[in-house]
Image (cartoon, coloured by chain):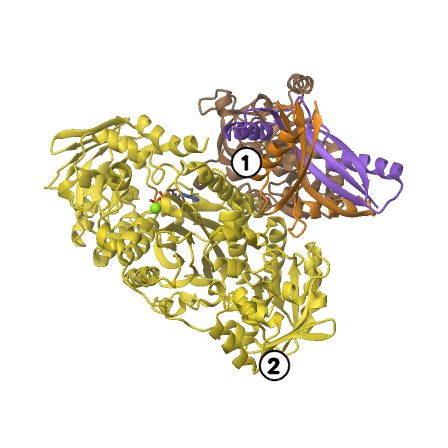
Chain colours: A orange, B purple, C brown, D yellow
Amino acid sequence: MLKAQIKVLLKQSVLDPQGQAVEKALGSLGYNNVEHVRVGKYLEVTLAENNREAAHKQVEEMCERLLTNTVIEDYTFTLVEV
Amino acid sequence: MLKAQIKVLLKQSVLDPQGQAVEKALGSLGYNNVEHVRVGKYLEVTLAENNREAAHKQVEEMCERLLTNTVIEDYTFTLVEV
Amino acid sequence: MKFGVVVFPGSNCDLDAYHLVKDVIKQPVDYVWHQEESVTGYDCIILPGGFSYGDYLRCGAIARFSPVMKAVKEFALRGGLVIGICNGFQVLVEAGLLPGALYRNTVLQFRCQFTHLKVENYETPFTETIERGRLLKIPIAHGEGNYYVDNETLRQLESNGQIIFRYATEQGEVSDTANPNGSVYNIAGVCNANKNVLGMMPHPERAGEAILGSEDGLMIFDSILKHWEGSRL
Amino acid sequence: MRPEDWRNMGLKDDEFKMIVEILGREPNYVELGMYSVMWSEHCSYKNSKDTLRTFPTEGERVLQGPGENAGIVDIGDGLAVCFKIESHNHPSAIEPYQGAATGVGGIIRDIFTMGARPIASLNSLRFGTLDDAHVRYILDGVVAGIAGYGNCIGIPTVAGEVYFDPSYQGNPLVNAMCVGLLETDKIKLGKATGIGNPVILVGARTGRDGMHGVTFASEELSEASEEKRPAVQVGDPFMEKLLLEACLELINNDDVVGIQDLGGAGLTCATSEMASRGNSGLEIVLDRVPCREEGMTPYEIMISESQERMLMVVTPEKEEKVHATFKRWGLTSTTIGFVTSDGILRVHQGGKVVAEVPAHSLAEDAPVYCPAYQEPAYLQTTAKLDLQTLPDVEDANQVLLQLLAAPNIASKEWVWQQYDYMVRTSTVVLPGADAAVLRIRGTNKGLAMSTDCNARYAYLDPYVGGKIAVAEAARNVVCSGGEPLAITNCLNFGNPEEPEIFWQFRQAVAGMGEACRALNTPVTGGNVSFYNETNGEAIYPTPVVGMVGLLDDVKQHCTPAFKAAGDVVVLLGDTYNELGGSEYLAAIHQRVQGQPPALDMKKEKTLQKVVLAAIKQGLVNSAHDLSEGGLAVALAECGFANGIGATIALTANGLRLDSLLFGESQSRVLISVSPENLSTLLELAAQNGVSAAELGQTGGTNMEVAVDGLTQLKLPLRQLKKAWQEAIPCAMK
Ligand SMILES: Nc1ncnc2c1ncn2[C@@H]1O[C@H](COP(=O)(O)OP(=O)(O)O)[C@@H](O)[C@H]1O
Ligand SMILES: [Mg+2]
């Protein structure tokens, strides 16, 4: 089986209010070296599939169709064996 | 500078309704090989800090204090240079 | 009895709590700005509902670090009465003043509706005058009111009488169908071991006038008043 | 400049020529961009302006009519109500959550810009049919987005409507309305006056999102729309809550000269409109605009539609105080320029003038078009409905169950239970009634509000459809005990450059105008959304009406729910053999045909007068307007809330059974009264020439209807309610 670890973030040009809020909060907690924060989604999808290539294609498709909205979000993923 | 890539998931013992919903949705889209889905948060925190050890300690602290709620969430992170 | 209603950036039920105290139960009340460092002079602190700091990251997670929360914590430790409603409950949980955690409703949607609450402990400052067996009709409005504690903590809460309200049907049955958000054990409100800090997801301040559909929320405030009067004797 | 340059920005060749004439030279790229957004249909109303002029916009209560950010109506005692509706259709089609959320954010800004405290939100939604997974995805996202924004900012979402029809499959409609309250002496306008006064920009940083959103809204959706993706933005309701509180604080302290939100066309629109209204000019320095991304060009900064930003003009003495107030609210504000006397909007960056154009020409001088119009060919076909060929109802029980489960009639609780409709503890009549009612704190008064439009009627006859939309909204307000005051409207249509579409538009506006005149409810503002088409197919013409009414005593509000057993059920108004355009015809016979029900405004007016008088005199225990699904559906709905059934006896008087039970004849209201009040009510009706038929009695747990002595309908209320309540949740599972 393969597990896709999918990271989803808002596109660079899109406002990330959550990231901003966390950035500000970390600053006011005294972490003055925090340059930038972004907040997104993390998904783990486990597939009964051993072929990495097939899995890769499928995860890509699932991301495009359901897991993300590519209008505002970008995603990356890695596959790990489980 | 170092960027912490932080993955946050609900603890195994805590029900993950979002993961369940996505699992079901993928199933009904015809992805029958999806075994399990979990949905969590992904954060990127960029630090003006080059010492990996110091950064590691700081990120851990930030996670415990603010970024996660350890009553229900687990987290892992990696540091990458930027 | 003097009330303080804390205002975080993003609080939006501050007005409602203020209105209830001032115009319905007719007690002195002030807004307390989140940057205040002291809450001395108040007899009861209300942490109102809303979306403090947008509820970004997690509900209540950022608000707990505001200066006023340090003061509220000290106030609570000295035995002061604190009631956190909805977002206020979330802040109290994040601040460690109450056990457990609140997260996404299992229905994955925001829910605004009337609920019926069964009172589990009448021996608290918040419930002592409530007629035994009386269900309270009080509305909820939240997306993250799913209360979680692990089994061990749940047992402790139970044996300490810290579980105050549970969601029930109109007939008083505590069941899955009555559970609007997936909370463990249908929990709608809990208090600390000392019983002076209450957190609840339902909004008693929205159930204080007949024209709004229920006056049952007043029972909680009546208890608070009576308790305070009693404690002064 | 090459023709592609202006054409790519949506400007026509003639329009480019006009710009050259105005400037006496060719515009540079920044200036061209500014004209293109300001002269888009969305900002300039160039196709609709002429038609909209026919709306009645004046009345003794109107304090602010169309032209400002929102309309304002006097409600006495020094108070006024401010309201407006706006569309966010195209963004919602592409990113339903954020599209709908930012739509809500935008209309809320329009309200507090006027100095009003927003007290309620409403929404009017149209989707394709629920058997389509993509439609369900859009519905789910839109509702969550409206909830996400409104709940967070703490403004109750109290009413609205949702319809489903294949014509909206690729082009959903998301119209958001906001209602605010203010003191009449605190009205603020979007005017830049006072030479030398500083101009302050506050709120979110400016980013590259939402570039050319207004041109996007002024085009048909197509595959290529996907490419224009950054036109969708992410909203930040938390930021808006802070802006709202800070701005209202400043306005209440009289610290503001003029104020305007940044919406469509961003900084360009706000600066040029404020200067134009103030007969002044503005000088602004883009280097001072806080940006989210590095290296943003003047073009990008001037047309960015980043949300949650406001522009205000203050006096120099107040400048520091204003910045301090924003700081206390955790907001960033910057003085970006000042007011001038020369009427020119002059934009600087890096020490250079990057744009220099007459403000008025951007805001007001867009060309006005009078598109060609022509009666649509489809009306020839749809008009032909021969009732002779339509089999009458055989099993009324079955039909009623089916109708109650039809998504257009079924309970919309799935939608509104996601909205916080109680925050601010002033909602007296909750969603699920004919109109929502809110109390006005500190007074005995209340406000009733509703949005309405039956687009199927408008499709079959835009004139009558427009008229009915106004009449129904007013009827809903009246049934709740409110006296209709005024309307706002959102006119959703296809491509106005198509003569048949423009004909629909003109007819609908004319019909609405007639109804508004008759009911004395002027139009105080609104919004036009054209180009609602996918791949050449237009939506039904959908002229949505948002109406606000006043209750002198909020305790006198009324709801549709039967209150007690033993009350007498009375139907006010007349029923005809009218099935054209009905939900019955569509849901049971799969036909969208015929003429919509006729509407006689004189009859409508007297009916409303009688209902309102009866409610005010405390004669009635419930009132419900008859709409989709007719009498049978209305009876069931009246029973649901308190689980009280009714036993009804009707006489057919030569009417078909389907018309009698499910027809949608206009100007009808179902009432329940205590037996002791019956005669007074009947007298009141008779005096005014309104027909009143005693239909039967409330009570029991069944809904039972006999026609000419024969039982036609008999079902447990519980069973009916289940069908009605579960239809949408089941479809959405
Ligand atoms: N999108 C919505 N948001 C809030 N409330 C809604 C929405 N859609 C419908 N409702 C509420 O559901 C009830 C029934 O709506 P509708 O069938 O359109 O009523 P009517 O036919 O009387 O106009 C109304 O109270 C309305 O406000
Ligand atoms: Mg309607």
Give coordinates of residue D238: x percent, y percent.
62, 49
Dot 1 amino acid type? Pro
Q: Position of residue D215 (x, y in %)?
A: 51, 61
Q: Subunit of mark 1? A: C
Q: Nearer the viewer, residue C212 or D639?
A: D639
> Is residue D459 something that shows in the picture?
yes
Q: Which residue is mark 1?
A: C204
Spot the residue most to the left: D654
Question: Image point 35% across, 33% down: which residue?
Answer: D724
Image spot of residue D572 (x, y percent): 21, 46
In 3D space, how far apart are the residues under numbered discs 1 and 2 (Cα atoms)?
A: 56 Å
On the rendered structure, is D172 left or right of D24?
left
Q: Chain of mark 2?
A: D
The CB of the residue at mark 1 lies under 8 Å from ligand 1: no
- Residue C7 image position (x, y, % from top left): 65, 46
Q: Picture quarter containing residue D501?
A: bottom left
In this orientation, which residue lies closer to the viewer: C67 or D654? D654
Position of C108 relative to D373 (above/below): above
Per the image, label 1 sits on a secondary structure element best described as: helix
Q: Is residue D614 above or below residue D370?
A: above
Q: Quadrant of the N terminus of chain D?
A: bottom right
Residue indicated by mark 2: D341
Q: Where on the picture, by quarter, is residue A38? A: top right
Q: Secondary structure at mark 2?
A: loop
Image side of residue D457 versus residue C187, left or right: left
- Looking at the rendered structure, the kind of residue marked 2 is Ser
* Rendered position, C76 above or below D454: above
Find residue D468 and report its image quarter.
bottom left
Q: Is residue D190 visible?
A: no
